[in-house]
Amino acid sequence: RKPISTELEMDFAQWGGASLGFAHATSLSSLLALRRHSVGRGARSFRCALSEPGEVAAAAATAGTVARATERKLRVLSGVQPTGSLHLGNYLGAIRQWQLNQDKYDNFFCVVDLHAITMPHDPKVLAETSYAAAAMYLACGIDPAKSRIFIQSHVPAHAELTWLFNCITPINWLERMIQYKEKSKKTSAEGSGPSVGIFDYPVLMAADILLYGADMVPVGEDQTQHLELARDIARRYNDLFGKRRKKLKIRPFKEPKGLILEGTGRIMSLEDGNAKMSKSAESDGSRINMSDSPDAIRRKIKRCKTDAVVGLTMHDDSRPECQNLLGIYQAVTGKTPEEVEAEVTDMNWGTFKPVLADAIIAHLEPIQKRYSEILSDRTYLKQVLREGRDAANEVAQVTLKNAQLGMGFSLASELDD
């Protein structure tokens, strides 16, 4: 009797390691063909032809064993604006945390250049600062083999999904955003007034997050409201179009959670311990830029604001500058708070500031060297960004397509059928 050909379809919708797992199934001697028809990471389907009906169950068992042994990593998305120079606060508060956690999660890290234009910017330097930000990600240890690195505007779905969300987001949700109120005051004081971009960028941020089905988003104290808005928009979309998506067998938008990063908290301004270190601050002396020379770092630390209280401690909330500078020292040296306290017991500001400056310089030196090498190797940098863009597009286009279908759009791809 001729061998019976049996079609077996295996759907590993939530298993990112499906391709690897099913490769193990090819050890079955009678596995004749393996064809992948995938529409995106996280939603994979495999079909194989087996020569004997009994081997269907064997293949399923083999793949199932590997699936159970391989847990799907939670997906994380984050990004930094390419405005100005990345500073020590961006690094210690965000990028280094990404690097330390990149083995735990399925990571998408982008340079958010679309957010950078919500405030007045210099078009002559936007492209170069975007490349520079990506180069700094790499120099700080973000591994493109473990994390996708890309420039936001290189994935058109960010802007397209934002428009879809704009049309279902009530205006009063955006009017209550704290950062909109703060930036509106600043632009009004400058005489220009707030742009639509300043008003609407939280919707773009929601699109950034939901586009990749992020399970978790690293957030600081000033970003929790934006994460809540993303959750609200996801919930509203699901309420409005959930029945249609369910009929089409499309999963609802996931409501992301905040990822609370351990270790260093917010890095504050060198001129005001109550204000966050910021690229937009007018005074360059308020921050340590990642590209600052040793002389510039020593000068800024020497001039930074301190207090007149005798003794140094990390545990006095009434001394924000003291807490900030000792916190920076702890972060760049890797010491525990107890070790820092013991070291500075007999110090005053005059003796501690040079020690702090030397520690920052020593920590940044290898990063700056690597940054210079990557920035000068534009071929490598573009390759990393191209691969990151392609991986991001693969996921983003599926999400956008599903969002459009849920809202009843016709698809351009239908014209080719």
Image: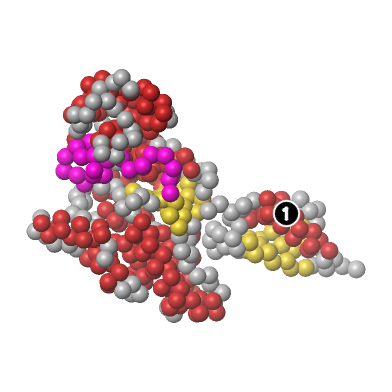
**In this rendering, position of residue 177 left or right of residue 99:** left
Instruction: Decide if residue 279 is in sight here.
Output: no
User: Which x, y percent locates residue 408?
Assistant: 44, 80
Q: Secondary structure at mark 1?
A: helix
Callout 1 crowding tier (Cα within 10 Å): few <14, some 14–19, many ≥20: few
Q: Nearer the viewer, residue 66 or 303?
A: 303
**Does residue 369 appear to the left or right of 390 in the view shown?**
left
Residue 29 horizontal/vertical position (percent): 80, 53
**Which of 194/222 is in front?**
222
Question: Which amino acid lies under the numbered mark 1 shown in the image of this protein?
Answer: Thr
Rendered image quadrant of residue 392: bottom left
For the point 74% across and 68% down, the residue is 7
| The residue stretch that appears in magenta | 260-283
* Residue at the image point whose x is 50% and y is 54% from the top: 75
Horizontal side of residue 222 vs 44, given as left or right: left
For the point 54% across and 76% down, the residue is 246
Q: Is residue 261 magenta?
A: yes
- Residue topped by disc 1: 65
Per the image, is 278 magenta? yes
Name the residue rendered at 56%, 74% in the picture: 249
Image location (x, y in percent) of residue 182: 20, 57
State which quarter of the image contains the N terminus: bottom right
Q: Is residue 310 above or below residue 77?
A: above
